[in-house]
Amino acid sequence: MSRLFTVLFLLVFATQSYSQETVNTIKYNYNAFYDGNNTALVNHNATLNYKQKLSNSRITYTGTFNAYNFEYTGTNMPFTTVGIENINSLELDIMYSQNISNNWSATAAIAPTVVADFGNILTSKDVYLGFFAGANYITSDKKSSLNFGVGYKGYFGKYRLLPIINFSKKVNEKLSYTLGIPATSLTYNINQKHRIKSEIAVDGFYSKIRGDNYFYTSGGGQDTEFKINALQMVMVTGGIEYNYISSESWIASFKVGHNIYSSLDAIDDQDNEHEISFNNDINISVGFIYNINFN
């Protein structure tokens, strides 16, 4: 069973972040993924959303920055680590939605992304173009929505063309759920100040490596050396998140989880994958959301 099929099987439903509801917000999360034996990871994630409402349509702008900082703690790592410890990505999503009727709307989005170690001069090879095109149906009572279409994006490492389908439902004033990618979640509002969310989320990147980094393998009585041409990561994590809503503007979050699936691969110039040990035991996330009123 291929790794991609394993990830798809675990998630069951495939969709894009474009289908998730966005408002005018600034969001930051500090994520720590621990592994006592080999590779640990710290991720800083910052997102800015802005929605521009037009007469019968809307445009949503989303800027996302990720800094992935790897610490290779194994004593005999079979690769050179200098130059592949810090990978950064900067993505700009521009989504246009056009109302077709009271219940239906059409959506199209482009998402150029820069992924690199940022230690060298950026080139066109560091830029990846993503897109999404589809439709959205929302019930008259606004409690359920269905999104579907096709997207081209790098949720599973390398960029791939994927069919998209996503469903969200508000069961009552306290309970709601979303089935999709990058997150499938079940949310329970305890009261106006406290909220609990159970979530399965996917994260990943594919980055070209231009330095002199090598991966070593042993076999047949001799060592073989491969030049690392790219680094690819895929993670599926599950966890419980607590939100404290301090006001209409601020939401604080704390999350504890565990990796359902994880892989980190060095890819050589023949496009062969060499697995780097990356089996995290636990992950912890803290962050905040600030709602901005532009109007």
Image: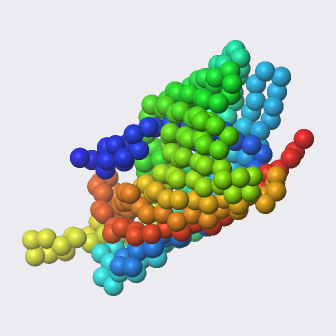
Give the camera-side residue of 66 and 291: 291
Q: Quadrant of residue 26?
A: bottom right
- Residue farthest to the right? 295
What residue do we see at 56% from left, 28% from top? 146
One can see residue 43 in this view: no
Please give the name of the residue rendered at 71% of the width and 52% of the height, measured from the top-left corner.
Answer: 191
- Quadrant (top left/top right/bottom left/bottom right) for the C terminus: top right
Looking at the image, is 159 positioned above or below residue 56?
Answer: below
The residue drawn where x is 71% and y is 17% is 102
Figure coloring: rainbow
With 19 as the anchor, is 267 left or right in this view? left
Q: Nearer the viewer, residue 151 or 146?
A: 146
Nearest the viewer among 67 and 200 is 200
Q: Position of residue 11 (x, y in %)?
A: 41, 44
The image shows residue 44, relative to residue 196, as above or below, that is: below
Total labels drawn: 0
Q: Residue at x 57, y 53 (%)?
A: 197
Q: Position of residue 169 (x, y in %)?
A: 58, 34
In the rendered image, which quarter is residue 57 located in? Answer: top right
Using the rendered view, name the quadrant where residue 278 is placed: bottom left
Q: Provide residue 61's location: percent of width, then percent of height.
A: 72, 41
| Residue 249 at least partly seen | yes
Residue farthest to the bottom, as pictured: 75
Indicate whether 150 appears above or below 61: above
Please indicate whether residue 55 sits to the left or right of residue 150 in the image.
right
Horizontal side, residue 118 vs residue 263: left or right: right
**Residue 231 coordinates in the image, percent (x, y):** 42, 60
Q: Residue furthest left?
A: 220
